[in-house]
Image: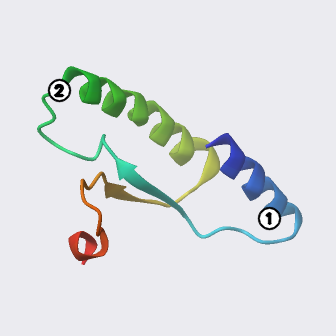
């Protein structure tokens, strides 16, 4: 997240305003997680996503975690 924040600052200095942030492979966007470790990771993501929304971008889009090698069919 910090590295992309630095990139955003560089783009800003160049007069370019990014349209939005894409949050991909997010565990926190899934429902019904029962594994304690995955639940913990999903909960930790919420704070990061909230920071992105508050500090880095007015618009965010999310793609939940998809367990598969070929992701495109899942997203269409």
Q: Quadrant of the C terminus?
A: bottom left
Task: Tell me where residue 41 appears, x and y as whole percent.
Answer: 35, 29
**Residue 25, how many percent across, how many down?**
37, 52
Q: Which mark is residue 35?
A: 2
Q: Nearer the viewer, mark 1 or mark 2?
A: 2
Up-down: is 61 above or below 15?
above
Q: Which residue is mark 1?
A: 11
Q: Residues within 10 Å of mark 2 (few under 14, many from 20)?
A: few
Secondary structure beneath label 1: helix
Who comes first in sequence, dot 1 or dot 2? 1
Comparing 43 with 73, the one in front is 73
Name which residue lies at 83% across and 58% down: 10
* Residue depicted at 39% across the width and 35% down the height: 46
Q: Residue 43 placed where, x, y %?
A: 33, 28
Residue 37 — which label? none
Residue 16 lies in what quarter of the image? bottom right
In the rendered image, the vertical position of residue 3 relative to residue 19, given as above or below: above
When the figure is inspected, residue 34 is found, relative to residue 7, above or below; the finding is above
Instruction: Find the residue positioned furthest to the front.
Output: 69
* Foreground of the two, 34 or 60: 34
Tell me the quadrant of the picture where the N terminus can be found: top right
Which quadrant of the figure has residue 24? bottom left
Q: Nearer the viewer, residue 37 or 10?
A: 37
């Amino acid at each position: 997240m910090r590295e992309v924040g630095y990139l955003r600052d560089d783009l800003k200095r160049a007069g370019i305003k990014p349209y939005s942030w894409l949050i991909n492979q997010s565990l926190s966007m899934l429902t019904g997680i029962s594994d304690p470790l995955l639940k913990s990771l999903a909960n930790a993501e919420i704070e990061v996503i909230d920071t992105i929304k508050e500090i880095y971008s007015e618009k965010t889009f999310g793609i939940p975690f998809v367990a598969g090698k070929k992701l495109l069919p899942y997203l269409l």
